[in-house]
Image (cartoon, rainbow, N blue to C red):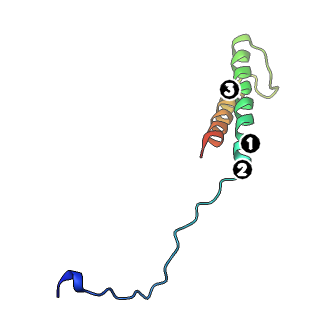
């Protein structure tokens, strides 16, 4: 029998709808840009403190938490703010 004449058998499986795209939480975008600002300020304060020996965070005399923490907060804020 030619291929064009074959009948398709009805499938017994239920038609599965494609998964719906979950809407992103609107709070992430609103929270992302302030996190960028806070992270940038924290990183800059740590950098300035390391150069001038000023201590902005009393528990961080070597300015490690301020610099690395500020960079992490800045990167997370950028990811949240610019992600679609």
Vertical placement of 24 versus 83: above or below?
below
Which numbered circle lies on residue 26?
A: 2
Q: Residue at x 40, y 86 (%)?
A: 11
Gap between marks 1 and 3 measured at Cα: 24 Å
Count of numbered labels shown in the rendering: 3
Foreground tag (3 vs 2): 2
Vertical placement of 53 versus 39: above or below?
above
Q: Quadrant of residue 79?
A: top right
Image spot of residue 23 (x, y percent): 65, 57
Q: Residues within 10 Å of mark 2 (few under 14, many from 20)?
A: few
Image spot of residue 83 (x, y percent): 60, 44
| Residue 62 appears in view | no
Single out the residue that lies furthest toward the right: 58
**Nearer the N terminus, badge 3 or badge 2?**
2
Q: Quadrant of residue 21?
A: bottom right
Q: Residue at x 63, y 35 (%)?
A: 75
Image spot of residue 55 (x, y percent): 79, 19
Tag 1 near tag 2, CB within 8 Å = yes
Gap between marks 1 and 2 measured at Cα: 7 Å
Task: Label 1: state its secondary structure.
Answer: helix
Q: Which residue is mark 1?
A: 30
Which numbered circle lies on residue 67?
A: 3
């Amino acid at each position: 029998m030619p291929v064009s004449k074959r009948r398709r058998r009805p499938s017994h499986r239920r038609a599965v709808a494609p998964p719906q795209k979950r809407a992103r939480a609107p709070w992430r975008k609103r929270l992302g840009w302030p996190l960028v600002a806070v992270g940038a300020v924290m990183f800059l304060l740590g950098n300035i403190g390391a150069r001038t020996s000023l201590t902005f965070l009393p528990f961080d005399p070597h300015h490690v938490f301020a610099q690395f923490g500020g960079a992490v907060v800045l990167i997370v804020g950028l990811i949240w703010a610019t992600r679609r």
